[in-house]
Amino acid sequence: MRLIVPRLFLSPPHMSGEEIPFIREAFESNYIAPLGPMVDAFEREFSTLTGIGHCVAVSSGTAAMHLALRILGVGPGDEVFASTLTFIGSVSPVTFLGATPVFIDCDRTSWNMDPDLLAEEMKSCARKGRLPRAVVPTDLYGQCADLDRILDICDPYGVPVVVDSAEALGSTCAGRCAGKGAFASVYSFNGNKIITTSGGGMLASDDPAFIEDARSLSQQARDPAPHYEHSRIGYNYRMSNIIAAIGRGQLRVLQDRVRTKRSIFEYYRQALGDLPGIEFMPEAPYGRCNRWLTVVLITPERFGTDREALRLSLEAENIESRPVWKPMHLQPVFAIDGRAGQKAAGKAQHVPARVVGGAVSEDLFRRGLCLPSGTQMTEGDMERVVAVVRRKAKG
Ligand SMILES: Cc1ncc(COP(=O)(O)O)c(C=O)c1O
């Protein structure tokens, strides 16, 4: 009889216990509402931690991006440049607003938006008098995009940069917290993130008027009046007081989580780095990555098997792993130049989009695999993963 071993998840939530007193306080105050003192304190503490002047806590990272782009005036007829190697929540807000995403390929040193491609495309769009309304680079798997270079490219054209740092809380870029220095930045507290509130997000900026506008739009854009008065349409995106209480506890363990994630990465690298045909996601020289997920590239000709066969072998041992994000320009919903695969029958949409480059992200998708990186993993858990990978490797 085969023993059932516990499932190893990619990046499950990890509560610390520090959350409990805040949750109790929220309960005892009866502030079970979509705002309140915990939300205010969570925002203040987040600002202090990141060094970003102002922020608003919302229901998800996707909501935070939607608010940012809406306030920047993104709308029909506009283009927004975004990373192609990312999660859809980074770019779906562009389409909520009726604008067209332009997907920029990544480079091999950071796996993030390639500044050279961005510069070329910006120049070409400027020549045509069609500058993008915003640029949205993703900080992939916790690795910061090269923000200083991206700002050097965008600033002369007056194009604002909104960094998608959903995966990068705790990482640094040129010594600053992920996202700091951009016009605005977006974070996620979804259940799989380095710290989580079950679900939630934060929009941060050094521009106080921008954040105040986002706060208003996130709570149905109510005008100041004793009755309910509205002169524009907003959203119900506010974070609840009880969720913010979890967030306050989680903020206190962020640095521990970064240390653990980085040590998991090091463990895998030492245990697997000698195998032919396996490479680890590089760390860009300008930053320090939180290593939210440990990601490897498998070259089948040298490793002996491909990424998908390795994933299935891990799955057979009750170990969750996942291919690198499928690039946005390959998603059936965007269907660019016939590159996308088969559309799902029935409910498929076709949303216009463009792509600049694409070969690098396609290669990373084909060969990339995210390994279990939960901060409660034991050495025995990591050894289970290592044993499967070593068994599948040639020689
Ligand atoms: C890169 C990236 N962008 C955006 C999001 C969206 O965040 P949320 O799930 O909180 O809406 C996520 C994660 O879920 C993400 O990984």
Image (cartoon, rainbow, N blue to C red):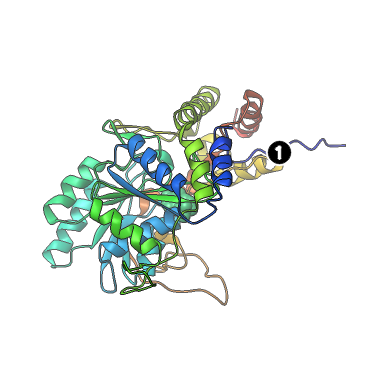
Residue reaching furthest front?
226
Q: In terms of image quadrants, where is residue 123?
A: bottom left
Residue found at x 50% / y 37%: 250
Examine the rendered structure and indicate whether residue 318 appears above or below residue 97: above
Find numbered disc 1 in the image and state the secondary structure of the residue it sits on: loop
Q: Residues within 10 Å of mark 1 (few under 14, many from 20)?
A: some
Residue in the foreground of this view, choosing between 211 and 384: 211
Residue type, label 1: Glu
Q: In terms of image quadrants, where is residue 328?
A: bottom left
Name the residue that disc number 1 marks: 317
Residue 305 in the image: state x and y as whole percent: 58, 40
Quarter of the picture containing the C terminus is: top right
Q: Is residue 344 left or right of residue 149?
A: right
Residue 114 in view: yes
Residue in the foreground of this view, choosing between 373 and 68: 68
Residue reaching furthest bottom?
346
Residue 378 in the image: state x and y as whole percent: 63, 26
Q: Is residue 247 left or right of residue 357?
A: right
Residue 345 in the image: state x and y as whole percent: 57, 74
Examine the rendered structure and indicate whether residue 166 appears above or below residue 378: below
- Cβ of mark 1 under 8 Å from ligand 1: the answer is no
Residue in the foreground of this view, choosing between 118 and 22: 22
Residue 42 in the image: state x and y as whole percent: 42, 42
Quarter of the picture containing the N terminus is: top right
Q: Is residue 146 left or right of residue 367?
A: left
Q: Is residue 144 left or right of residue 278?
A: left
Residue found at x 66% / y 41%: 313
Residue in the foreground of this view, choosing between 140 and 23: 23
